Every structure is written in structure tokens, then in C-alpha cells.
């Protein structure tokens, strides 16, 4: 599935810089970054503040990854307010053009490569990324199971067979 910009709906382009993968909009120049990637180079306290303030956030745009509504949070960045859209389920942050520079002005060099981290730190980063991916997969599987239960409850034998076949294929 192609990820789309939550602002202009342009298909996002996958880019890599210094071994770090991110999605970018070639039209409005917005960027989608996963939290583990952002933690590699953004000020730690700012990233933490995003998650602490998330319960009070207002509605944001649609998530480029899962299409669910993101939450828009206003972050104080050295006196300037930066509005960032956050998808808690995908752990994805959307930065409009120039917002990442405001969010992390002191560290605009490309994110450090994980091979420069200590072995223990690199392992912790890798484990966090795996856990996030596993959680996203589990959420997808849970949604499929709910859909299957709804189909089964509807009494449609044909639909039930299709759902059971699909679930069996996913588990292989």
C-alpha cells in the first residue's frame, strides 16, 4: 500500500540518509519519521514531551501508514510552537516542511549510524524497532480476527469459509 501525504495526498517517496529510512512528500516537503528514528538525533526531552502531552492533543490529519486519525500536538521549540501530527498506533510523526528543523535545530546533521553506537545501545535500538513492528502486526491480526468474527456472526457460510481461508494463509 502506498503511503500518502496527510496534507496534499501525494504518494510519499521512501528516502534513506546515513542508513536511516524515512518517507517524504515531494510536493509539500513534509516528512514522516518513526519514533525510534527520531530518537536517534532529536533532543531527547522534546521527543519525550510529545508522548507525555499526547493525551491532551487535538485531532490531526490522517496517518500516512494506517490512515487512522493522528493527534496534533503543539511542541514548544525554543519559544516557537511547532504543530506535529502523531500516530500513536504506528509510532509515526508527521513534520510539515521546515518543522523538523525547528524541532531539532541543534542537530541537523544526518542521524548517526547505529554501527557507531555501543553494541548494547545498538541492540536496544534494534529491539525497540522489532517490538514496534511486532505490535503493528499484532494490531493488524487482531483487526482481521474481529472482522472474521463479525462475518461468522452474520451467518454467511461462504463468507466464513473465505475468512477462515485467509486467516490460515496469514499464519503460514
Image: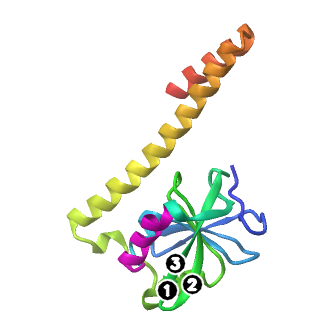
Spatial CA distance of label 2 from label 1 is 6 Å
Whether residue 91 is visible to the viewer of this picture, yes or no, is yes
Tell me where residue 148 appears, x and y as whole percent: 62, 22
Crowd tier of the residue under label 3, counting other residues whose Cα lies within 10 Å: few below 14, some 14–19, many 20 or above: some
Q: Secondary structure at mark 3?
A: strand
Tell me where residue 74 appears, x and y as whole percent: 56, 75
Crowd tier of the residue under label 1, counting other residues whose Cα lies within 10 Å: few below 14, some 14–19, many 20 or above: some
Picture residue at 70% right of the left edge, 71% below the top = 25
In terms of depth relative to the viewer, which is nearer, 168 or 99?
99
Callouts 2 and 1 close, C-beta under 8 Å: yes
Count up the numbered dots. 3
Q: Secondary structure at mark 2?
A: strand
**Snapshot quadrant of residue 39:** bottom left
Asked if the magenta segment contains residue 71, the reply would be no
Tell me where residue 86 appears, x and y as whole percent: 56, 63
Asked if the magenta segment contains residue 43, the reply would be yes
Is 117 on the left-hand or right-hand side of 135? left
The magenta segment is 42-54
Spatial CA distance of label 3 from label 1 is 6 Å
In terms of depth relative to the viewer, which is nearer, 62 or 53?
53
**Snapshot quadrant of residue 98:** bottom right
> Which residue in the structure is indicated by mark 1?
77
> Looking at the magenta stretch, what is its main secondary structure?
helix
Picture residue at 22% right of the left edge, 65% below the top = 119
Spatial CA distance of label 3 from label 2 is 5 Å
Picture residue at 37% right of the left edge, 77% below the top = 45
Crowd tier of the residue under label 2, counting other residues whose Cα lies within 10 Å: few below 14, some 14–19, many 20 or above: some
> Which residue in the structure is indicated by mark 2?
81
Callouts 3 and 1 close, C-beta under 8 Å: yes
> Which residue in the structure is indicated by mark 3?
75
Picture residue at 49% right of the left edge, 86% below the top = 77
Amino acid at each position: 500500500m502506498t503511503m500518502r501525504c496527510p496534507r496534499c495526498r501525494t504518494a510519499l517517496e521512501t528516502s534513506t540518509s546515513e542508513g536511516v529510512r524515512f518517507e517524504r512528500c515531494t510536493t509539500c516537503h513534509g516528512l514522516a519519521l518513526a519514533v525510534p528514528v527520531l530518537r536517534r538525533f532529536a533532543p531527547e526531552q522534546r521527543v519525550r514531551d510529545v508522548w507525555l502531552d499526547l493525551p491532551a492533543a487535538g485531532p490531526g490529519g490522517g496517518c500516512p501508514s494506517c490512515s487512522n486519525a493522528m493527534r496534533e500536538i503543539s511542541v514548544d521549540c525554543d519559544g516557537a510552537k511547532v504543530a506535529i501530527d502523531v500516530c500513536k498506533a504506528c509510532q509515526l510523526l508527521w513534520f510539515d516542511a521546515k518543522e523538523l528543523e525547528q524541532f531539532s535545530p541543534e542537530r541537523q546533521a544526518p542521524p548517526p549510524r547505529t554501527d557507531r553506537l555501543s553494541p548494547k545501545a545498538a541492540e536496544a535500538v534494534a529491539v525497540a524497532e522489532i517490538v514496534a513492528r511486532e505490535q503493528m502486526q499484532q494490531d493488524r491480526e487482531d483487526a482481521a480476527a474481529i472482522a472474521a468474527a463479525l462475518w461468522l456472526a452474520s451467518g454467511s457460510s461462504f463468507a466464513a469459509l473465505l475468512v477462515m481461508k485467509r486467516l490460515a494463509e496469514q499464519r503460514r
